[in-house]
Amino acid sequence: MNLPTLYPVDFSMMMSGWTPAEVEYPAPKPTTAGSTTPAAAVPLSEEDLRLRRSPVTEFLQYLNRDETINADHAQCMEMLLPSDDAAIYGSTDLVTNWYKRNFRIFTNINRITTFPGDRVRLLIGAGHLRLLRVLAADALFFCLVDAEGYLQ
């Protein structure tokens, strides 16, 4: 993209609130030599199918549509519905950690930006868009520009 500098702004954190450094991943199980049992194929999601059928620009336009962003964020809100889980705030804590991660990402964006005058192009996973848009729109020091014009 001919940019002089790229800055990482993500804050790697799981919805549990743990960072990757706090997790011990189990060693992979050894496979049995000569095994003839094929691994079960996992069906592709509707979004994965769309990605395979669409040009990249078209897929990015889809991900940046308000309807897609709102539907994606609605999944977090659905986690707050009553459930049979004994930990009544378990899902609330997961959503809180998702918001915390996005606030940290926004803080990282602010740390690398010189106000006024800098222009920032953010490339980030679509699940972050709703919250980061709200934060940027609420911050009087940002002038939020939609990505649609760049995806033509």
Image (cartoon, rainbow, N blue to C red):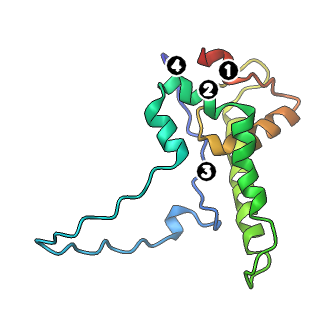
In this view, 109 is above or below 89? above
* Cα–Cα gap, marks 4 and 2: 22 Å
For the image shown, how many numbered marks are present on the structure? 4
Q: Are marks 2 and 1 in contact (CB under 8 Å)?
A: yes
* Cα–Cα gap, marks 2 and 3: 25 Å
Q: Are marks 4 and 3 in contact (CB under 8 Å)?
A: no
The mark nearer the N terminus, 1 or 4, is 4
Camera-side residue of 61 and 12: 61
Name the secondary structure under disc 2: helix
The mark nearer the N terminus, 1 or 3, is 3
Residue indicated by mark 2? 61
Residue indicated by mark 4? 3
Q: Amino acid at mark 4?
A: Leu
Camera-side residue of 23 and 61: 61
Sort mark 2 into few (<14), some (14-19) or many (20+) by Cα contacts within 10 Å: some
Q: Residue at x 73, y 74 (%)?
A: 90
Instruction: Tell me the mark number nearer the camera, choosing from 1 and 3.
Output: 1
How far from the left and from the top, in percent, is residue 1? 49, 18
Instruction: Tell me the mark number nearer the camera, choosing from 2 and 3.
Output: 2
Residue indicated by mark 1? 148
Q: Amino acid at mark 3?
A: Phe
In this view, 53 is above or below 26? above
Q: Quadrant of residue 18?
A: bottom right
Q: Are marks 2 and 3 in contact (CB under 8 Å)?
A: no
Residue indicated by mark 3? 11
